[in-house]
Amino acid sequence: MDYIFEEVVVKPSNSPEYILNGEEVDLWSDEYIYYHSKSIIDYVRERILEFEKKSEDPFFEIIGKSLEKEMVKNALLSGSNILFVGKKGYGKTTFSKSILKLLPEKILAIKGCKIHDNPTHPTCFSCKKKVLESNSVELVWIPRKWVRIPGDPMMTTRQLIGGISIQKIREGYDLDHPEVFTPGRVLKANRGIAYFDELGAIPSALQTMLHELIEEKQITTPEGDILPLRIDSIFIASTNPANYRGTSDIKEPLMDRMEAIPIGPPETLEEEIQIGLKNMSLRYGAILPEWHLKILARTVRFARMKDRCRYASHIEVEPSCRATIKLFDHVRASATRKGREVVMLSDYGERYEVIKLGLRSRMELDYEDGISKDEIIEKLVEEAINRTCGEIYSQIQSEEFTSIMKDINESERIDVHSDNLEEFRNIWDKAVKISKNENEIISAIEIILEAIWRCTELIDKVGDGVYEFKA
Ligand SMILES: [Zn+2]
């Protein structure tokens, strides 16, 4: 039983026979050496350095966030655990999953081990016994793993760490008996990544146990035995900024073992749009021209700008990138249902109902003093349309403007849904210039007219897509 409390390391000199898929393998040969003995953090370090050497981004699938990426690389190379601090929906989980991709796709583990022990450096008693006392030890390939551990205030020790009893071994239970050893979620993350979603919500007594496990590589069983548990894992945690300083916070000793990296909203409008497009659920259907992407992304971004948008000051819980993604989806869905090739302003809904559909559940007001959530959304959309139309308007050269106005003046009224739009030669030419393809032209004509209507007093909007010259 002594080996339970000792560190067991297998070397070529004391190695049992290792069997993989029914055949004996030489673990120290070139073919297998990479897949065992190394710690998870060492695999990650090697990969990061390979990327650095090639000046490539190991987290290329994450849009923007260049400073955050630098900090993550640095922390990992230093062998630190990471705490992502940010509101939900800004990619903390995505980031932790992209760290997973730095692990080898597969590694070797002892067959039957509940925590996928390293063949040469096992942690559980059963495997320690196996490598010390058996003539042959069977191995399996295991894929890289990412174990999510939800921050549940009701979580038990058994769920988090597991059930471990030396007493049961003394009573004669088999080492593999569930009463002797049943790993909880953290131990299941052995040789992979443990992702604590809302670490602060884990009961503080359990946080103390986690600290013991992470820092001292041991646990104290309910019976009082102190057991070495050399778990090999990268710990990544997330927390909401409110919890970071608030009541249900993370215990000091644990905080001291993690590097906090803030994860905020996308820095630029362009990044916000890219994230939205990349994550849309409706992959086909009506085109979303650039001006609509900007209006929708701006609506969400204005809701976050407490210092720059007066309506945002009413918002307590701000909409995340998920709101942007859903607005893109909903507006495309609206146009696609009508059989359109391209999104038009009417796809927002008469009173922007389609946008409200995507925003209502994703933001919360601070207090409702005479203004409702729906009204705030309407104001945000209006601001976003005004800003985007202002940009469109400023791109119209003065000679273009004169000729466009001549077009409208001549026929007095223009309906973007009519099929004689090409007759408005000058406005058509301008629309072609700002369109990416011919399907966008009708939407471009509409946004040009909308921009002139909003930015000048020269035309009137008299209906959906219908603009009139003002006498
Ligand atoms: Zn084991």
Image (cartoon, helix red, strand yellow):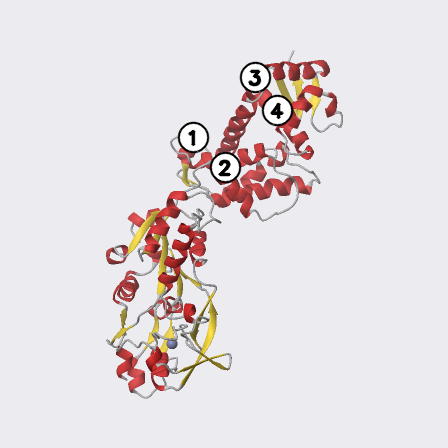
Dividing the picture into quarters, in which one does residue 446 lie? top right
Dividing the picture into quarters, in which one does residue 309 lie? top left
Residue at the (43%, 53%) spot, across then down: 93
Q: Name the residue carrying label 4.
A: 448
Q: Nearer the viewer, residue 294 or 366?
A: 294
- Any part of residue 84 in sight: no
Q: Amino acid at mark 2?
A: Glu
The secondary element bearing badge 2 is classed as helix
Q: Residues under labels 4 and 2: Cα distance?
A: 21 Å
Task: Indicate whether 339 appears above or below 17.
Answer: above
Nearer the viewer's eye, disc 1 or disc 4? 4
Task: Indicate whether 104 appears above or below 346.
Answer: below
Q: Residues under labels 3 and 2: Cα distance?
A: 28 Å
Q: Amino acid at mark 1?
A: Cys
Q: Name the residue carrying label 2.
A: 270
Q: Nearer the viewer, residue 361 or 14?
A: 14
